[in-house]
Every structure is written in structure tokens, then in C-alpha cells.
Image: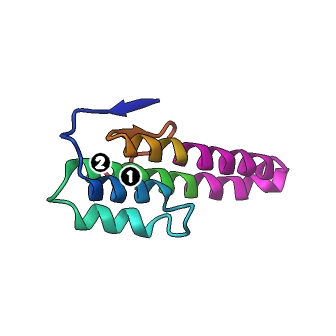
């Protein structure tokens, strides 16, 4: 669990966009919101871009892991793994949102870096 620091003090709106990017899966738009934030804030705030990129990579990784679990459900190990992934998704999203609210960027463990 690493944090990326070294940002200038983010404004309130930057913190909100970063926070929403991490919690987007819990509010029902796991890929759309971080992607829109990442693309629209590209030239404005490195803090928001880094948080949106991390959230997007995390959501894409979770999708891939769930698809693999779907295939593994044939041999009865997929469902327990999917439950563990769901719990990890909830906990890690909340941890990342807290880090974003504190002005940092959380690097999710076991996340594939699709967007750089």
C-alpha cells in the first residue's frame, strides 16, 4: 500500500472529483465517471488525473478478475473468489477515497495499469 504524494494543496473541487472517481463503483458508474474525469481534467490538475487514472485502472482490473472468476465458477472456486474480490473492492475503494480526501493518491494493490 503506497501513497503518491508531492501534490500542491488540492482545492475542494479537486478533492471532490478525486473522491468521486474512487467511489464511482459504489454509486453505480465504475468506469464512466473516472474516464470522464480523467479525460476532462487532463490539462488542469495532476492530482485529479492521478486519482482518476488509479480508479479507472482499479475498476478495469476488478472487471477482469470477475470475468476470470466467472470462468472459474465451473470448478466451484469462482464464487468464493468473487465474494472476496467484492469485499476487497469495497474496502480498497473506501481507503482510496480517504487518501484522496487527505490530498494524496492511493495506489491500489494488484491493479493492472491499463491507462498510463
Magenta segment boundaries in residue numbering: 64-93
Q: Is residue 21 above or below residue 93?
A: below
In this view, which residue lies farthest toward the left? 43
- For the image shown, how many numbered marks are present on the structure? 2
Residue 78 shown in magenta: yes
Q: Is residue 55 left or right of residue 53?
A: right
Q: At 47% from the left edge and 29% from the top edge, which residue is drawn?
A: 1
Give residue 2's quadrant in the image: top left
Q: Which residue is mark 1?
A: 114
Color theme of the render: rainbow
What kind of secondary structure does the magenta stretch mostly adopt? helix
Residue drawn at 32 percent across, 41 percent down: 103
Rounded to the nearest whole Å, what is the CA distance between mark 1 and mark 2? 13 Å
What is the secondary structure assignment of the residue under circle 1? loop
| Horizontal and vertical percent position of residue 21 | 41, 58
Estimate the x, y position of residue 23 in percent, counting from the top left: 49, 57
Q: Is residue 21 left or right of residue 27?
A: left
Position in image of residue 26 (x %, y %): 57, 61
Q: Earlier in the sequence, mark 1 or mark 2?
A: 2
Is residue 111 visible to us here?
Answer: no
Q: Nearer the viewer, residue 77 or 54?
A: 54
Q: Is residue 11 magenta?
A: no
**Figure check: 110 above or below 66:** above
Q: Which mark is residue 50?
A: 2
* Mark 1 surroundings within 10 Å by alpha-carbon count, few (fewer than 14), some (14 through 19), many (20 or more): few
Amino acid at each position: 500500500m503506497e501513497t503518491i504524494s508531492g501534490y500542491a494543496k488540492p482545492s475542494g473541487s479537486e478533492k471532490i472529483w478525486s473522491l468521486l472517481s474512487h467511489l464511482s463503483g459504489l454509486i453505480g458508474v465504475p468506469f464512466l465517471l473516472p474516464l470522464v474525469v480523467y479525460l476532462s481534467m487532463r490539462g488542469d490538475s495532476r492530482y485529479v488525473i492521478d486519482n482518476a487514472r488509479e480508479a479507472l485502472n482499479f475498476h478495469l482490473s476488478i472487471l477482469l478478475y470477475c470475468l476470470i472468476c466467472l470462468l472459474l465458477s465451473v470448478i466451484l472456486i469462482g464464487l468464493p473468489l468473487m465474494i472476496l474480490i467484492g469485499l476487497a473492492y469495497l474496502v480498497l475503494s473506501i481507503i482510496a477515497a480517504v487518501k484522496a480526501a487527505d490530498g494524496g493518491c492511493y495506489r491500489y494493490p494488484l491493479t493492472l495499469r491499463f491507462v498510463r
